[in-house]
Image (cartoon, rainbow, N blue to C red):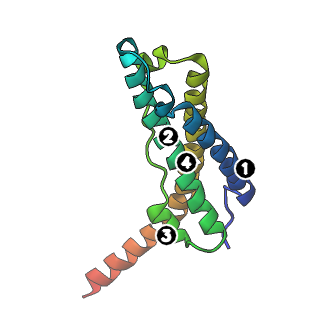
Amino acid sequence: MQSRDISEEIVEDLYAEALVLADDVRAVFDLRLGAESTGSDDLLRVALSIEGLRTTTRVMHVLAWLLNQRAYYSGELTETQLRRHGALPEERTSDPDNIAMLEPETQALIRESEELHARVARLDRAWRNRDSDHDAPVQALQGMIAKAFASGS
């Protein structure tokens, strides 16, 4: 079995962190709680809605990536399946104008989700780059073999 840059323990720790963050995000961005607000709050509600969707999506992408990793460690996914279907989607950055309208606690929660996504993205890139470095010599050898057989016929 190949050595892995990402340990099962790291995945489990990140998963627990992401679950707590997802619960906090849900509580903060539950827009039903302020439904009785007046028209003067419209821009704030729009900013809260947009950033809530971005933050929720960011956290759900991290959770999906971590669930794929957990499935891999438990033997439910092969490395090929993980490589093909387990990539972390690109970050959708927050709008600074929207962020400026939000409460400091909400801003901190958004930053926390961005930092978690960045950490997981670094792990994902490192794992994918490690494997592509190992594949390069094999692909070069396959190319040489293909050329040798093509010129021999």
Task: Rate crowding at label 4 as few (under 14), some (14 to 19) or many (20 or more) other CA atoms within 10 Å.
Answer: many
Kindly check if marks 1 and 2 are in contact, taking CB atoms under 8 A apart as contact: no
Kindly report which numbered mark, 4 or 2, lies closer to the viewer in this rendering. Answer: 2
The answer to which quarter of the image holds residue 51 is top left
- In this view, the residue in front, 152 or 76, is 76
Upstream in the sequence, badge 4 or badge 3?
4
For this orientation, the residue located farthest to the left is 153
Mark 3 or 1, nearer chain start = 1
Q: Which of the numbered marks, if any, corresponds to residue 85?
A: none
Distance between the alpha carbons at the discs numbered 4 and 1: 13 Å
| SS class, disc 2 | helix
Q: Nearer the viewer, residue 16 or 74?
A: 16
- Secondary structure of the residue carrying tag 4 is helix
Mark 4, residue position: 62
Separation of disc 4 and disc 2 at Cα?
A: 10 Å
The answer to which of 129 and 142 lies nearer the viewer is 129
Q: Nearer the viewer, residue 145 or 117?
A: 117
Q: Specify the amino acid type for callout 2.
A: Thr
Residue 117 percent across, percent down from the top left: 55, 40
Instruction: Using the numbered discs, state the Cα–Cα distance from disc 4 to disc 3 in whole angstroms.
Output: 18 Å
Callout 4–callout 3 Cβ contact below 8 Å: no
Q: Amino acid at mark 1?
A: Asp
Q: Which residue is mark 1?
A: 13
Q: Which residue is mark 2?
A: 56
Quarter where residue 116 is shown:
top right
Residue 136 seen in render: no
| Cα distance in 3D space between marks 2 and 3 | 25 Å
Q: Nearer the viewer, mark 2 or mark 3?
A: 2
On screen, residue 150 versus residue 56, left or right, reads left
Indicate the quadrant containing the C terminus: top left, top right, bottom left or bottom right. bottom left
Camera-nearest label, 1 or 2: 2
